């Protein structure tokens, strides 16, 4: 695959092969001790053109950044849908399902980023994935038992931008490595005030522990613009990780893609998604 620094113009052209974006409502009981406390949440689900419930689809869970919600990727930036339609219509990536949830749950607006990015792991595992993969046709085939979700992890990816990039590491990679084998952190790992060396240690431990359990990494596709506010910390962490983590092999299961002149904005994040979808699920 050839990396580019600008979204190809053809990706923004109109196409007759349009996917569908549906809203999915689901309930979460993850955050309270009592079962009578139910949090009602929504996510958007992109279904590719020609979606057929009799077929199985790979699935990407895709997060927004701080201060917004599940509307970000598809509703606030509908050209994301156009890009996806064109990629799949032109065979640039295989048809897949893409889910855009939110880690916020009302009162979270006053909680710090560390709390949000870490604790979303529980809702992701117990509530969101079972709701989505019961409602839509993935390789789980409607069986959302933990055993089956682990068995089908190679057909599941997680990516996110900015605060969602931090969540990709913490909620999906560190805490749910047994459910995903493809990752796309777009813009940052620990934030400006995080402990960079601690993140290196967590990445190494996750891959080492996963290997002992027979859980391999298909791909960790890190992305940043070189003028992005999150670039230096993300680059430092991943460069140091490569020095001490034999499980990460550039070009085989890892890349750090840098947009020359890229900043912390949607133009960059859509380009990251464009590249990530050409990598995710490519080896299965």
Image: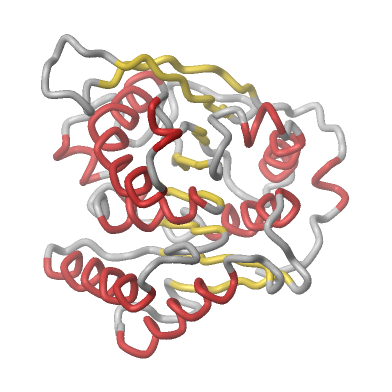
Q: Position of residue 42 (x, y in %)?
A: 46, 20
Q: Position of residue 106 (x, y in %)?
A: 42, 24
Image quarter in which the N terminus is found: bottom right
Q: Position of residue 69 (x, y in %)?
A: 54, 31
Q: Is residue 195 above or below residue 11?
A: below
Q: Is residue 62 above or below residue 233?
A: above
- Image colouring: secondary structure
Which residue shows up at 48% across the image and 54% down it?
165
| In this rendering, position of residue 166 left or right of residue 231 | left
Which residue shows up at 67% across the image and 26% down it?
75
As drawn, which residue projects farthest toward the front?
Answer: 110
Instruction: Identify which residue, 35 or 52, lies in the foreground.
Output: 35
Which residue shows up at 38% across the image and 63% down it?
218
Dividing the picture into quadrants, the one containing residue 231 is: bottom right
Which residue shows up at 63% across the image and 59% down it?
275
| In this rendering, position of residue 7 left or right of residue 135 | right
| In this rendering, position of residue 83 left or right of residue 237 | right
Instruction: Identify which residue, 222 or 262, lies in the foreground.
Output: 262
């Amino acid at each position: 695959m050839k990396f580019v620094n600008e979204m190809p113009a053809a990706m923004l052209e109109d196409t007759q092969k349009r996917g569908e974006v549906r809203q999915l409502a689901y309930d979460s009981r993850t955050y309270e001790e009592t079962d009578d406390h139910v949090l009602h949440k929504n996510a958007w689900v992109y279904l590719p053109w020609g979606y057929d419930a009799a077929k199985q689809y790979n699935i990407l869970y895709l997060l927004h950044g701080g201060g917004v919600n599940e509307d970000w990727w598809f509703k606030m930036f509908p050209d994301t849908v156009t890009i996806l339609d064109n990629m799949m219509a032109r065979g640039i990536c295989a048809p897949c399902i893409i889910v855009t949830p939110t880690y916020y749950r009302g009162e979270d607006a006053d909680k710090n980023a560390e709390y949000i990015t870490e604790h979303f792991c529980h809702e992701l595992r117990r509530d969101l994935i079972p709701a989505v993969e019961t409602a839509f046709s993935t390789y789980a085939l409607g069986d959302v038992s933990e055993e089956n979700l682990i068995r089908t992890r190679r057909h599941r990816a997680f990516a996110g931008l900015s605060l969602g990039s931090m969540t990709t590491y913490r909620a999906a990679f560190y805490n749910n490595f047994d459910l995903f084998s493809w990752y796309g952190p777009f813009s940052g790992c620990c934030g400006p005030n995080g402990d960079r060396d601690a993140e290196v240690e967590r990445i190494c431990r996750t891959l080492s522990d996963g290997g002992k359990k027979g859980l391999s990494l298909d791909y960790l596709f890190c992305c940043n613009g070189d003028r992005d506010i999150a670039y230096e910390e993300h680059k430092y962490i991943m460069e140091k990780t490569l020095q001490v983590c034999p499980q990460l092999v550039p070009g085989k299961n890892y890349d750090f893609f840098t947009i020359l002149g890229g900043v912390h904005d949607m133009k960059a994040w859509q380009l990251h998604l464009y590249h990530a979808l050409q990598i995710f699920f490519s080896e299965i």
